[in-house]
Image: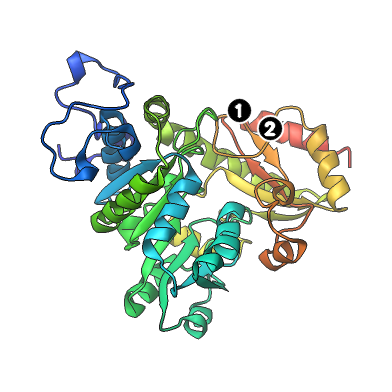
Amino acid sequence: MKVSDMSMETKLIHSGEPSPRVMGAVSMPIFQSANFEFKGEESYHDIKYIRLNNTPNHQVLHAKLASLENAEAALVTGSGMAAITTALLTVLSSGDHLLVQKTVYGGTHSFITQDCPQLGISHDFIDPADPEDWEKKVRENTRAIYVESMSNPLLEVGNLKAVVEFAQRHGLVSMIDNTFASPVNFRPAEWGFDISLHSCTKYLNGHSDIVAGAVIGKADWVERITHKLNHLGGTLDPHACSLLHRGMKTLALRVKYQNESAMKIAQFLESHPAVEKVNYPGLESNPGYRFARELFEGYSGMLSFEVKGGVHKAETFMNATRLPIIAPSLGGVETLLTRPASTSHAGLSPEELQASGISESLIRVSVGIESTDDLIADFQQALDKL
């Protein structure tokens, strides 16, 4: 059976694995060696060396990640931000202009608004659901358009199909952060995106015990980004590679359960009188539902909501819960709660938070794999305390 014909569940277990297996080992061994014997490699980038992200542990992950999104190539990095920043610095140069979704992960927002201008790179924020907005803001020096499959933390879903068409029409590089969706729910390469980015810290690893990133997409862009990363040094160490490799094996099982659980929790919250608003793309009331229904195979384990009464009530709710852990990050087996304004988006000014639609009282939920009924019961008793 060809890899392209395999289901997601089968790819997660078998794609990219060495054949024959290393010394017959069923589990991929950890190659804890900084350097490897020189074999006459002609290119600097082909020399086997940990910093060049090309040891056996890296290579297995590259092949597996590419197969999951049916893309041409992939690259692992030392963090999600290493993937994002290195990709942007590869695509953009001084004098270039970027179109970027108005609500994105806080680290991405800060890099684009604070670091890129120092490098001579300008940007405009866009509404991801409004192609007319993009047409008004595209310039002769626009080089790329950057969106998120599901925005962090508002779970907005834009017109991603139109993003690709717009990029191709204007000769732009289409870039998408696919962390919230994961390859189980959405595979950007199948829709024509050039570059897909992930914080593997989240769903791909799934166990809250490493920091890692990935770039997946067209081979020429992955190669260029690899060469840039080789100089910048955003390397993933072999032990972290091994933990990511192991965590990915259960990705489909975890995400499918989290999809179902998050949907039920979102429906519960939407019906509760103490809740002001729920952001979840699987709800028909969500503005991006029409796009999500066409694009995604599931709506993720992420949601966000606001309780009535402001930030004090939000903190009261969070502190009253018993099962979730109040902590940043997401995508693990445990349910996590956080207020993005104080964690993932703490680097944004009050004005930037307001422009992005992120309130101080917004609560982001990363639904884990606990019993859905137990989580709903816990949320119910916490809401009763408001």
Q: Quadrant of the C terminus?
A: top right
Give the residue at mark 2.
375
Residue drawn at point x = 68 percent, y = 32 percent = 375
Q: In the rendered structure, which amino acid carries the disc numbered 1? A: Glu
- Answer few, some or many: residues within 10 Å of disc 2's Cα (few below 14, many 20 plus, some between 14 and 19): many
- Answer few, some or many: residues within 10 Å of disc 1's Cα (few below 14, many 20 plus, some between 14 and 19): some
Disc marking residue 370? 1
Is the image coloured rainbow, by chain, by secondary structure, or in one colour? rainbow
Q: Position of residue 233 (x, y in %)?
A: 40, 42
Q: Position of residue 165 (x, y in %)?
A: 36, 73
Residue drawn at point x = 55 percent, y = 66 percent = 118
Do labels 1 and 2 touch, CB within 8 Å?
Answer: yes
Q: Note whether 128 is above or below 304 in the view shown.
A: below
Along the line of sight, which residue is nearer the eye, 272 or 203? Answer: 203
Residue drawn at point x = 40 percent, y = 30 percent = 237
Which picture quadrant has residue 334? Answer: top right
